Image (cartoon, helix red, strand yellow):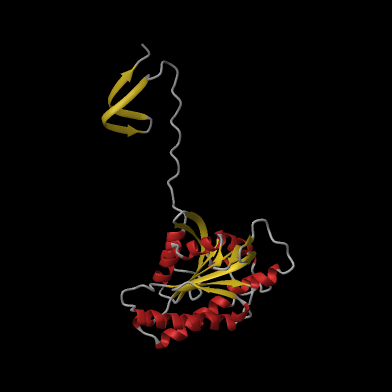
Amino acid sequence: MNIFGDAAHGLPDRPGERAAGGPRRSQHCVLLAVDVAAFTDPARTDRVQLAIREALYDVVPGAFDDCPLGWDGCLHEDRGDGMLVVIPARMPTITVVDPLLDRLAERLRRHNRSASGPHAVRLRAAAHIGEVHHDAHGLAGTAVNHLFRLLDAPALKRALDDSGGELAFIASDYFYDSVVRHAEGTVDPAAFWPVTVEVKQTRARGWVHLPHSPAGTPALREAAAPARTAPPAPPAPAPGPGRPGGGIAFFGNVTVHGDVVAGDKIVRGDG
């Protein structure tokens, strides 16, 4: 499936888009990336890693074929311990969340029933929308970079580790605000919670979702909640008449009874 070629058919080249090998293409796309958790764990030898990649290419394309997306209708690129998938514009964007995430989780559970130890597969997934460039070497662009920053977010890794499930998902702020927040049917926007993504030069907000545990966990929700700060102290009373610095200063042991204050004090007069 040549998504970029089909989408750009009949359109004039943009300035600077023509390269030696022909015109480069760009398109506003829905992007999905998946990554195998702990792929480089020392317990995973080269042979185990190859078996995991085999499982990955069974689980993910199968999940796409289980829903209206269809694997052969998407553009995909291998990323070693994961993959990048471009969803065609003709597909409803919400399909990336519903039903794809549930299909992925189901297939992961099915695989892990017969896989033990280092052969078990757990995935992180991320979705974003943006302009993607396609040249002779593959997919590139700021949107692709942002997608993989989301995928590497510590908050997403923590969500997967703490939940004990097979799959953790994060949507970009733009994806959540444009798609998830307006979704109908079985998608509940309240089942996503905001997290801060700080990876390399990126600082952004993402929205985490656990398909097997939509409410998250108390620990995860607490970690994602805005920090609670003490209310600001009331302003100091304005000084009374007289020169600056006038008044009474107490030190040592001070006793207060209503409006009566007793203790050692220094009286600063007006002159």
Up the image or down, 123 lies above or below 113; here it is above
Residue 215 position in % (x across, y down):
49, 69
Q: In which quarter of the image is residue 30?
A: bottom right
Q: Residue furthest front?
A: 20
Residue at screen point 43% across, 38% down: 233
Residue 85 position in % (x across, y down):
56, 72
Q: Residue furthest right?
A: 10
Residue at screen point 61% across, 72% down: 87
For the residue pair 237 and 54, the one nearer the viewer reads as 54
Q: Which quarter of the figure is the C terminus placed in?
A: top left
Up the image or down, 135 lies above or below 238; here it is below
Residue 12 position in % (x across, y down):
73, 62
Please say whether residue 235 is visible from this viewpoint. yes
Residue at screen point 42% across, 87% down: 113
Q: Which residue lies furthest to the left in this view?
A: 252
For the residue pair 179 and 259, the one nearer the viewer reads as 179
